[in-house]
Image (cartoon, helix red, strand yellow):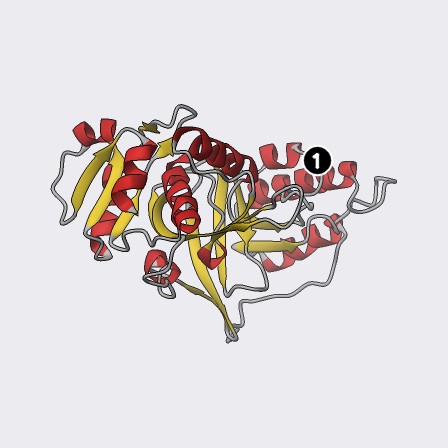
Amino acid sequence: LGVDSDALYLLAETNVQEIANAVDDVAPDLLVADSIQTIYRPDLSSAPGSVSQVRESTASLLKLTKEREFSTFLVGHVTKKGTIAGPRVLEHMVDTVLYFEGDQNHAYRILRSVKNRFGAANEIGVFEMREDGLREVPNPSEIFLSERGYGVSGSTVVCSLEGTRPILVEIQALVTPTSYSTPQRTVTGFASQRLQMILAVLEKRAGLAFSDHDVFINVAGGVRLEEPAVDLGVAIAAASSFRDIPADTGSVLIGEVGLGGEIRTVSQIEPRLKEAAKLGFDRAVVPENNLDRIAGEYDIDVSGADQLTGVVDAVL
């Protein structure tokens, strides 16, 4: 990592009391404990990693931090469901909870704040994993779109708001006739239940029969999207692949899809338009009701849409 400092100390210890003694000797400005599931209090009979040990060890480190007036980072494991392993009260005890997301198949990592007692939550930072460690990605949208294919069906671009940060991401869809009795629905980076709803709306309102087709959805770059504002992009990507007609490559799609096929209003529309214009897109399709909320002028053509069927016909 290239660290060359006389002010960096390493301690191979899991006993809370020994850690406290080392803090008294060194008087650090910052303490990093890795991991909280291995730290224990000797006065408790339970094993390290148990609910009581994690809770009480955290309480001891929290008390130590406030008494000595320094900052502490607690590194913790997560469960298979992606939540912090241990008691739920652990998240309530600390000031900030950050999740470090990513997988071995992608070079990019996302640091996501799910709780912040002294600032905005749901903010993200995007980093690239290199041989010399993590490096900041100053413009994530440009990186996530760098390998985008043009003239290919099933590809759209959406703008997701992560906290206060707009990020442009490519949605990829592949729709093929199924060879199974039950069609496959495979999703990466997007909620599978939401995809089922979008496909049902497309079949009911737009007449696209997905019941005998396999559908594969991928959010390029290893990003995980949870915001409903990306629904429209997912729907058009699926429709594009179903018809085998490329979508307009210069358009960004923003909008939530309702069960009636309506395009519903989304929040923070102006930062999304600004990000799309900055990356050179010449058109943005947004919910009709959002048009009145656009106060500024942006170097991008903004089109309003109130029904999914209209967007399918206009973009494809």
**Furthest residue in direction right, as rendered:** 45
Q: Residue at x 54, y 53 (%)?
A: 101
Q: Looking at the image, is 130 positioned above or below residue 73?
A: below
Q: Position of residue 302 (x, y in %)?
A: 18, 41
Q: Position of residue 53 (x, y in %)?
A: 77, 41
Residue found at the very far top of the displayed protein: 260
Direction left: furthest residue:
297
Location of residue 66 (image quadrant) = top right
- Residue at the spot x=28%, y=55% of the render? 249
Q: Does residue 47 appear left or right of residue 100 in this picture?
A: right
Camera-nearest residue between 132 and 177:
177
- Say what amino acid the circle numbered 1 marks: Pro
Q: Residue at horizontal 23%, vertical 44%? A: 284
Q: Is residue 162 visible?
A: no
SS assignment at label 1: loop
Residue 31 at x, y = what percent? 58, 54
The answer to whether any part of residue 27 appears in the image is yes
Q: Position of residue 310 (x, y in %)?
A: 28, 34
- Residue bearing mark 1: 87
Q: Within 10 angstroms of label 1, few (less than 14), some, or many (20 or more) residues?
A: some
Frontmost residue, 290 versus 56: 290
Q: Residue at x 32, y 62 (%)?
A: 150
